[in-house]
Image: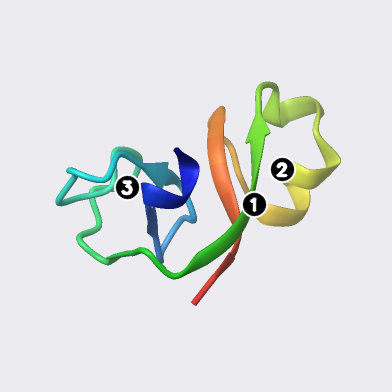
Amino acid sequence: MASDRLVCRECHRVNDPDNETCDACNSSSLTEDWAGYVVIAHPEESQIATEMQVTEPGAYALKVR
């Protein structure tokens, strides 16, 4: 379930709950306090990816606290 996952405070990437560091940026600043997410398949063609400054495909949280 997505709500059990951790999100990186640096890049907003959604990670598995057992991760100690982010899969994308290797940051150890992960949190359970986040809301909403978007899956970006083609960041080079996505206006949302441009707004979020995302360059790699994956699942990203919309709001991270």
Residue located 26% across and 45% down the image: 17
Residue located 48% across and 42% down the image: 2
Q: Is residue 63 above or below residue 53?
A: below
> Which amino acid type is shown beneath numbered disc 3?
Cys
Residue 4, position in %: x, y? Answer: 37, 49
Q: Which mark is residue 53?
A: 1
Which residue in the protein does label 3 denote? 25
Residue located 41% across and 63% down the image: 10
In the picture provided, is 2 more to the left or to the right than 41? Answer: left
Q: Seen from this angle, which residue lies furthest bottom?
A: 65
For the question of whether residue 26 can be seen, the reply is: yes
Which residue in the protein does label 2 denote? 49
Cα distance in 3D space between marks 1 and 2: 6 Å
Q: Seen from this angle, which residue lies furthest right?
A: 47
- Seen from the viewer's position, the closer of residues 60 and 44 is 60
Q: Is residue 58 above or below residue 31?
A: above
N-term mark: 3 or 1: 3
Q: Seen from this angle, which residue lies furthest top?
A: 41
Residue 55, position in %: x, y? Answer: 58, 37
In the picture provided, is 7 more to the left or to the right than 12? Answer: left
